[in-house]
Each structure stands twice: as structure tokens, then as C-alpha cells.
Amino acid sequence: MNTTQYLLGLDIGSSSVKATLVNVESGASVCSAQSPKEEMPMLAVQPGWAEQDPDLWWHHAVISVKTCLKNIDGANVKAIGIAYQMHGLVVLDKNMKPLRSSIIWCDSRAVGIGEKAFSQLGHEYSLKHLLNSPGNFTAAKLRWIKEHEPDVYSRIYKIMLPGDYIALKLTGEATTTSTGLSEGIFWDYQSNGVSQKLLDILEIDRSLLSRQVDVFSEQGSLTQAASDELGLPAGTKISYRAGDQPNNAFSLNVLNPGETAATAGTSGVIYSVTDQNSYDMKSRVNAFIHVNSKADVIRNGVLLCINGTGILNSWLRKNSIGNGNVYSYEQINSIASQSPIGSAGLSVLPFGNGAERILENKDVSASFHGVNFNRHNQSHVFRAAQEGIVFALNYGFEILQSMGLKSQVIRAGHANMFLSPLFREAFVNTTGVRLERYDTDGAKGAALGAGVGAGVYKSFAEAFKGLKQIGSEEPERNLREQYLNAYQVWKEKLEMVVKKN
């Protein structure tokens, strides 16, 4: 009698932690669980700050895994993969305990530090070697701790990205990956290793970085302590780890030059794969090592990120009342569709979740423009918000195109903002590219990655045999013209606001 085997994927987000079990043979998800049901809190002690307790991620990971295992024998789980929110910083003492809350991806406090390092390194050197300015990424956040919390810094034994911390909780080992180091802007693409020059500029001791393991590899085994909490056998292999956006691209089988993925959860991203060490002269989009990159085969992902996408839709839902109740997202989508393209002149800039890279690290906040009390209603507001998110993504997409990263098709999971028909219509007709939607998500991608890393799957093609396309949209000439006209109006509002800042 054959026993069904499974792979487990964890997606450590800033809103929730998701676990998915995948059937090895079919490649299909058999169980998914998410915790908490509502969004995890972010600590914002000052404007522009965003922190989370790393042990909160572990707490919800345990809940999600246990939920998935209710009717599954954990002994049949062959490997575990991890996807995680990028660019965060976890600092640990010698006992591998967090010294403070994690400074997460959307925290803006280190912008000035990154800009100073950019000047000290020299813009040309930084872009050629790091493919980015140090910006507001993990390395700059660590320097912020050194400057503002010297007592904490003096007790740091290891630093980690969020996914590294979850791997530590699973295995008891302090490790990271080349992709993770590139996400923190620690990586020198010319020497193909950690940038000692950056560490010297920021006065960071190299010993604080964790041991490097391969993205697809046996990175460690489940400890007895983790086994007792999760209900999985001690010794289960952890065999894949990647940041959420490289992993999202992987989950969509986006691995080759010219292929492009998109997400629109709390933040929104368009991520294009290239075989070049490409960079934007103003560092408005960012290049990272892609999951399948090797020393002799370059695969980088060039990423544009809008911090305020799904979080804007969530904010509107929480603060809008219909018949005495908070709307569902489906109701918001229905109400939004009652207004015309362009929302009758109402424009929303969705930049209310920290400094935006595509705006050269400016924090311009979210804003509404062209409101007419005699003309606009709730429907216009809801539609203008979704259009504003799409227009912001397109603003960044134009930067990718100017770098020679041309996309004819964008793949996305059927989730978050891509569940909205109006959002999809606006997206394809503003960007002008075909959108393909698939039955996948980050947790499922992490599970499939674990299968590759553990040798359960012998190739990427075998891992993606169960990937199913569930829908697609194409631009329509008449609609595209209308959306581009609305986009130009929106873009003028954005340029006006940026100029004032």
C-alpha cells in the first residue's frame, strides 16, 4: 500500500502566517491554514516606523501547521520550505533570543542612513556592485540600531531576515542564503559574495552575518523542541528558503529571462527575471538574486514595489460602513464597478505605508485629489483607490521597461487584489500586457521549493506539473485608451505632490 507523501510550505507575511500541504504526486494543495484570521499588529511607535515581534510569527506558524495536520500524519511530510517578508531585521543575542522587535520591510527610519552610505560608496560603485543604493534595507536598519540603540547593538550575536529566524526556530541553526543577503543589500555582484566595502562603510562586523546555505538544499533538520510544538517528526528536512517576492515568482514558474510575476497583497510588486546585472540609475527599482541563480548562470529578479496596495483597500474596508456593517471585499468591488473609468476625475495616490522606492525613497503619504462633494460618492472613492494602486504599479512598470525589461505576459496568483475583476481590467489595460492567473500562492510555492531542495522532485518541470492556469485577461483597445487617459491625469497629480516634497 502506497502512503501519500506531502510537502509543507510556510509563508511568513506581515499580515498573517500561512501553511500549505502539497501532495507530492499531484502537486496539488490538500490543506491550507492561515493565522491569525485578522491581520497581525504592527508596532508604529513613531510615524514611518513598523515593527513586529519575531516570536509572533512563530506562534502563528505553529497554529497554521497544526491546523493543516489535523487529518494528516506528520510522518508523511517529507520536507519544509519557507517564504518570508523581505528586508526585515531580526537581531539575536548569544542565546539566539531576539533583543528587540523586528524592524520590518515597510519601516522608513533608515532612509537617511542608506542615502548617506550611497554617497560614501559613490553612486556608480554602489549601482555596479550592489545593483541598488543601500536605501532602506536590512543593512541600513542595522546601522540605525548601532547609532540609536548602542546597548542593543553591543549584545548582537547574529542578525537575520524574518525567514532566517523561522529557519532557526525549526532547526536551531543560524543560517541565511545568498538571496537573503542580496535582499538586505549585503551582496556584491562583481565579487559574487558579501560586500566588505559596504560593511566597512556602515561599520558592521562581518561575524554578525549567519552561515550561508543554498536556496534549494538540506538547510537543517527539525529539532525535537520544534517537533513537539508542530506535531512533525524530529529530523524532517528544511530544504528551501526565499523572500516572498522571489518565492512568488518561483510559485508561478517564473524562472527565465523575460518572465514576469506580480502580487498585490499588503504591498504590490511586479518582478521580472533577467540574466543581466541590471540596475536603475536612480535605484527606484531593485535587483536581487533570484532563487535559481548560480555562480555561472545569472538569474536576477528586478522588483518594483508599491508599499500601499492591498493595505489601502483594507483601510477603506475597515473605515467604510454600509447599512451599519463593515463591507466585504466583494461588496467593495461591486460598488466600485458602478463608477466610470477614471472615477469622474477623482484620483487616489496610494502611498500611505512608508517611503516608496519608486519615488526615490520619499514618503509622500496617501492623498485624494479632485474630490467634488456634489459629484463623487462612495463608489467613486472605491474605484479611484483600485485604479490608484494599478496606476502606481504602472508608474514603476514604466521604469522596468526603460531598463529593457519588456514583458508581454504577467503571471499572478488568483488572490488578494487580483480577485477583483475591476482591478484586473484596470491592470491589463493600463500596463498593456496579458495577465495570466494561476492556482498558487506563496505557501504552495515554498512547499514545491522544499520538494526540489530535498530531491523529492528531480527538476523544476517535475515540481510544476500540477500548476494550473485558471484565468486570463487581455487588453482591449477602447478600454486601454480610457485607462491611459485616466493614468495621465493621475500621473500629473503624483508629479505635483512629489515636487512639493
Image (cartoon, rainbow, N blue to C red):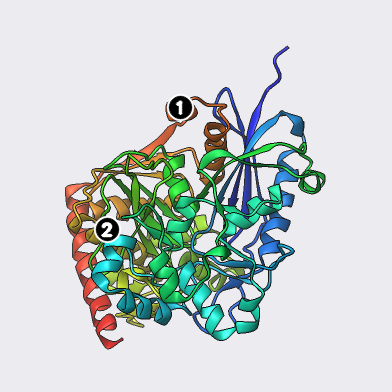
Which residue, given by chain and number where applicable, does mark 2 sit on? 397
Front tag of 2 and 1: 1
Q: Name the one closer to the observer, 478 or 1.
A: 1
Residue drawn 38% across the image and 43% down it: 293
What distance separates the C-alpha of mark 2 from that of mark 1?
A: 31 Å
Residue 51 image offset from top left, x and y in percent: 59, 72
Task: State which quadrant residue 437 falls in.
Answer: top left
Q: Position of residue 480 (x, y in %)?
A: 20, 54
Q: Position of residue 236 (x, y in %)?
A: 70, 36
Q: Earlier in the sequence, mark 2 or mark 1?
A: 2
Numbered badge on residue 459: 1
For mark 1, does the 10 Å Cα neighbourhood hold few (<14), some (14 to 19), or many (20 or more) residues? few
- Most extreme residue toward the right is 228
Residue type pointed to by label 1: Ser
Dot 2: few (<14), some (14–19), or many (≥20) neighbours within 10 Å? many
Relative to 216, is 339 above or below?
Answer: below
**Which quadrant of the figure contains the C terminus?**
bottom left
Q: State the SS at label 1.
A: loop
Can residue 340 be seen from the camera position used here? no
State the quadrant of the N terminus. Answer: top right
Q: Is residue 267 left or right of residue 49?
A: left
- Three-letter amino acid code at the position of disc 2: Phe
Residue 49 circle label: none
Q: Position of residue 377 (x, y in %)?
A: 40, 73
Q: Quadrant of residue 115?
A: bottom left
Secondary structure beneath disc 2?
A: helix
Residue at 18 percent across and 58 percent down: it is: 402
In the picture shown, does residue 376 fall above or below 476? below
In this view of the protein, which residue sits in the foreground, 395 or 381? 395
